Image (spheres, rainbow, N blue to C red):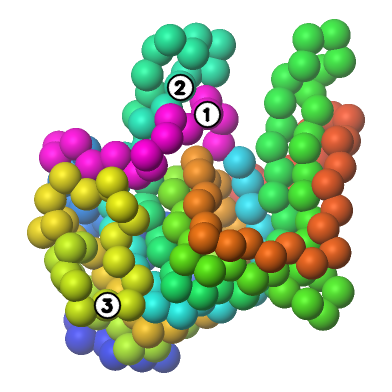
Amino acid sequence: MISQVRGGTRWKRFALVMVPSIAATAAVGVGLAQGALAASFSVSGQDFKVSADELVGDNLIQYGSVAKGKTLGDDKKDAYHPVTISGFSHAEITNMCQSLVTPVPGLGNITLQLRTGNKGRPAVAENIYLDVAELDADAKFEQLDIGVAAGDASHTTKAQPGTLADGALFSQRAKKATLTNVRQKAWATTAGTFTLPDLKLRLLSGDQPCYQDAK
């Protein structure tokens, strides 16, 4: 049983709350039914891609929720996106890339691409929360607990403020998480501090995301 594994677990291509798909869907469904919103701000009508060679995070908390945002092309219309919120008290990210492809009238698609943490100095985040729609990676968890109430106060990293309608929502947590070969689509990221060494921000012509979707 997955719920009895305490450490050293490794999964390939995991998504949402990193438990079997039925439980993951149920967790997000509960969040939606109870009106849990994943951000105190309205997210844009576009998700973005993030890739990294490695993310090492301390005090993981993870639970399903819903990001409320705008609809691209109609900013008066609300949209709702099921997400998994992943929070870390501290995270180090090696060779990080973030990209967003935007259609521009008269110019076609333009890619905003950010790269950092690729010269021996990882990007470092404190109190970071990721509102994730899709995640593929290899993962290792240490001191893993699955099925914890999201409002449980006995963990270093608490649920993101304003995201829980009910503190009894399903969550999982781990003392440490190591993700490698990360490929992620997200709607929002918030952090207390985010240090980005050797930051390079570019506007590129055409579709040049951090990674291509698997066919």
Q: CA distance from mark 2 to mark 3?
A: 33 Å
Above or below residue 14? Residue 66 is: above
The residue singled out by tag 3 in the image is 155
Residue, x 63% and y 46% (percent of image)? 49
Q: Is residue 204 magenta?
A: no
Q: Earlier in the sequence, mark 2 or mark 3?
A: 2
Please state if 145 lies on the left or on the right of 111 as rendered: left
Q: CA distance from mark 1 to mark 3?
A: 31 Å
Nearer mark to the viewer, of 1 and 3: 3
Res. 44 mark: 1
Question: What is the secondary structure assignment of the residue under circle 2?
Answer: strand
Q: In the rendered structure, are the residues bearing label 2 and label 1 in contact, judged by CB atoms less than 8 Å apart? A: yes
Residue, x 47% and y 55% (percent of image)? 130
Q: Earlier in the sequence, mark 1 or mark 3?
A: 1
Amino acid marked by disc 2:
Lys
- Look at the image and tell me in which quarter the C terminus lies: top right
In the image, which residues are magenta?
A: 33-47
Q: Residue 161, image x and y in percent?
A: 31, 52
Q: Residue 154, image x and y in percent?
A: 20, 79
Above or below residue 104? Residue 197 is: below
The residue singled out by tag 2 in the image is 70
Q: Main secondary structure of the magenta part?
A: loop
